[in-house]
Amino acid sequence: MKKKVKFLTYQQQLDNLRDHGLIVTNDRIGTELLQSRGYYNLINRYKEDLYRKGQKEYPIQTTLEDLYKYHRIEDDLRNILFRFTLNVEQRLKENISYALASNFGVDPKQYLNPHNFNLRHASRTSSILYEFERILSRPRSEPLRYYKNNYDVVPPWILLNDAMLGETRMLFGILPFKLKIYIIKSMLPVANQEFGSRPKSTEEEWNEYIFWQIEKELKQKVDIDKDDPNIVDKVADSLEKKFKNKLVELFSTMIHSINDFRNALAHGDRIVHFKSRYNLKYKQLYSIIEVDITKKRFDTKNLGNGIYGILIVLMCLLDKYDALLLIRQLKDWQYQNTRTYNDRKTYNLFIKNCNLPRRFTTELEDINHSLHYYSTLNKSFPFLRDGKYADYD
C-alpha cells in the first residue's frame, strides 16, 4: 500500500523533526532554512546519513544546523568538482578538434567524412556523425551561428563547443586508433614523467615511456642483446600495441566516469553515494600513477568508481595548473569545514559516507607529484604553492 502525502506547515515540519530526536534551537531560523532549502532537500536527502544505525532517530545532540552544515559541505564540493569537470570537457574538445583539423582539414565535409572514422561498427559511426551533422544544421549557441553566417566553413573547434560531453565522448569512441593515441598523449601526463635519462622531445618522452612499460615483459620473451633484431622488433611491436590498447581502455573509462558524474549532477543526484557504471582498474591506473595505494585497499574499499575515482580522473586529465588549483580549493574547502569541533564531526561523517580516505587531499598531492614536475611548476606559478593553508587532513 502506498504512503499518503500530507501537507505540513513549516511549524509542523519542525515539530516532526523534534519527534525524531533532532534539536531545533530556534524556530525562526529553522523556518528560514526550510523555506530556502525545502524539507526534502534539507532533511529527506540527508537523514539516512545522520540517523543512528538501524533506527529512524538522530543521535543525541544532533541539530537542524548540523543537517544544514552537512548539506552545505556536499553542495560546496559539488560546485568545486563540477567546475573542474568542465575544464576536462573543454580540454577533451580542444584535443579532438586539433586532431581532426590537423589530419582532415577544417571543412565539416572533410572532418566528418565517415571514411575517416572507425568503420568496424559502421551503423554506430554513421549514427554518431549524424548527430554532429544535426548540431551543425541546428546551432545551439551563438558562436556556431556566427560562423555559419560569416565564414565559409565551421571548423571542428567551433562545432565541438556546441556538443555535449556525451556526444564528444562518443565521437572519441569512433576515432581511428592513431588519433585516439594522439589525444591520450596530449591529455594523460605520461610523457611528463622522468623515465631514465631526460628525453629531448615529447615524442622521445612518449617512446621512452612506452618502452619502460613493456621492457620487463619484453625481456621475458626475448633476449634483446642476442636474439634476431627482427624478432625483437616484432615482439616489441606486439607488446606496444597491447599496452596502447590498455591506455585507450583506461582513457575511455575515465571519460565515461566524468560523463556519468556530470549526468548525476544534472539530475540532482547526491554525490555522497555516487557510483559510476565504469570502474577504474588498479593495474591500468598504476601504469600512469606511481603512488602508495595498495591494490587490496583500492579494491576492497571500491575506490575506483566513487568520488575518489572521480578525483583521481581529474588529477590525470586536468592540465598541471588546474590540477594544483583543484587541490588548493579542496584544501580550502576542508579548512572552511573543520574549524570547530562540531564542524570537524560533521565533515568527518561526510567524508566517511563519501568513501573518501581521511587524508585524501594528501594522497591527491602524492598523485600530482608523480604526474607532474612540481619544482618547475612552483617556480613558474608561485601563487599555486602551498603556504596559505596547512594540511587539514
Image (cartoon, helix red, strand yellow):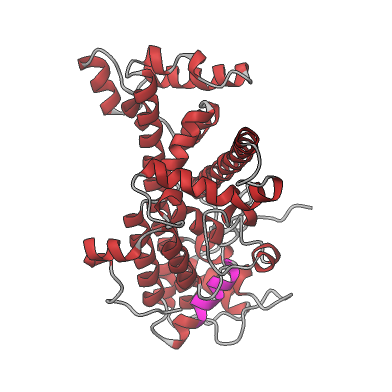
Instruction: Answer whether residue 280 is visible to the viewer in this image.
Output: no
The answer to whether residue 146 is left or right of residue 357 is left
- Magenta stretch: give its range: 345-354
Is 243 left, or right, of 393 in this rendering?
right
Question: Relative to 132, is 229 on the left or the right?
Answer: right
Give above or below for 319 relative to 239. below
Q: Is the residue 129 above or below the residue 42 in the image?
A: above
Residue at the spot x=58%, y=40% of the render?
A: 240
Q: Is residue 268 magenta?
A: no
Give 385 or 237, whichever is nearer the viewer: 237
Query: Between residues 204 and 168, which one lies in front from this camera angle?
Result: 204
Residue 190 x/y as whole percent: 46, 50
* Residue 244 x/y as whole percent: 57, 40
Residue 32 image offset from top left, x and y in percent: 39, 68
Q: How many marks?
A: 0
Viewer-proximal residue among 231 and 377: 231
Please name the residue shown 40% across and 41% down the image. 203
Q: Based on the displayed image, in which of its 4 quarters is residue 382 positioned?
A: bottom left
Q: Residue at x 47, y 82 (%)?
A: 344
Classify residue 12 by image quadrant: bottom right
